[in-house]
Image (cartoon, rainbow, N blue to C red):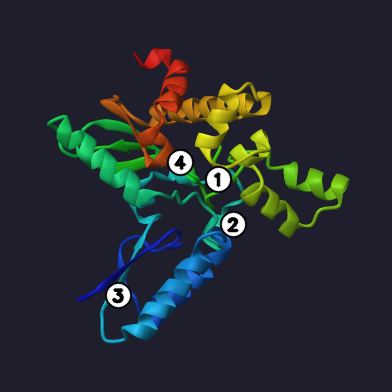
Amino acid sequence: PQAIGHRVVHGGSLTKAELLTPEIVERIRAATPLAPLHNPAHLIGIEATMRLFPELPQVAVFDTAFHQTMPAHAYRYAIPKFLYTEHNVRRYGFHGTSHAYVSDRGSELAGKFQKGGWLTAHLGNGSSTCAVWNGQSVDTSMGLTPLEGVVMGTRSGDVDPSLHSFLAKNLGWDLAKIDKVLNNESGLLGLSQLSNDMRTVIEAAENGNEDACLAIEVFSYRLAKSLAALSCGLPSIDGLIFTGGIGENSAYIREKTLAYLPHFG
């Protein structure tokens, strides 16, 4: 190979693809608490390829980079300012490479490359939605971490922020336990009590499993709700694009979601 590229979920404040240097690797490591399911695995791959191919240039492409065009009113949380200015607590967004590509491709097929307004839904084990205007991200469903937003395979998506304190006080759970439950044991898996795989959940629902039926309804409704909210960031909408394993392959989920959006036309 002539060069090696790495997809990295969280780049923190890094806003573009970067040539991997010891400094950039450490900045990726520093962002690990914000993407605990992903960045550790990325670092293993980066360190392995740097060890095996020390002579090759290596580049990191960040899922967060595409969303750096979001305006402040989309990426700031309504919390004390010092948490943003001193600790970089803000909404970053993820799946940027996917949202960028499918919105570019959709606008190209419509004969208006990187023009107009597009809503994109990347749906897989991890899922997020995005509003794109003239080729730039203006808002997205994920936030500081990939836990925020719509329902996912094992991730809860949005919950009441006071849930952490409720679980700590009433169940005696520590933060590590709560994070594990919300990241690894929730979402489709938590609702259905069966699987994080939408295909398995749909099959169970077709066989009359009530938990599976509810999991599909919650997933589809929360997805539609997110898309409707993101439409506020667009002056007009040219199209809605579904991608990812679920978005591309499940006409059933697309149909269920669109049923909640009759006002989209």
Q: Which of marks 4 and 1 is nearer the N terminus?
A: 1
Name the amino acid type tagged 3. Gln
Residue at the disc numbered 3:
58
Q: Earlier in the sequence, mark 3 or mark 2?
A: 3
Q: Which of 163 and 202 is in front in this view?
A: 202
Q: Give the label, 3 or 1, closer to the camera.
A: 3
Label pair 2/4, CB-CB below 8 angstroms: no
**C-alpha gap between disc 3 and disc 2:** 33 Å
**C-alpha gap between disc 2 and disc 1:** 9 Å
Name the amino acid type tagged 1. Tyr
x and y, in percent, of residue 207 in the image: 60, 23
Label pair 3/4, CB-CB below 8 angstroms: no
Name the amino acid type tagged 4. Ser
**Dot 1: few (<14), some (14–19), or many (≥20) neighbours within 10 Å?**
some
Q: Which of 211 and 254 is in front in this view?
A: 211
Residue sitting at x 51%, y 47%: 143
Q: Earlier in the sequence, mark 3 or mark 4?
A: 3
Residue at the disc numbered 4:
128
Residue at the disc numbered 1:
77
211 left or right, relative to 133: right
**C-alpha gap between disc 3 and disc 1:** 34 Å
Q: Which of marks 2 and 4 is nearer the N terminus?
A: 2
Q: Residue 65 is drawn in which quadrant?
A: bottom left
Q: How many marks?
A: 4
Residue at the disc numbered 2:
83
Name the amino acid type tagged 2. Leu
Residue sitting at x 51%, y 52%: 90
Label pair 2/1, CB-CB below 8 angstroms: yes
As drawn, the residue found furthest toward the left would be: 111
Q: Which of marks 2 and 1 is nearer the N terminus?
A: 1
> SS for tag 1?
loop
x and y, in percent, of residue 190 in the image: 67, 39
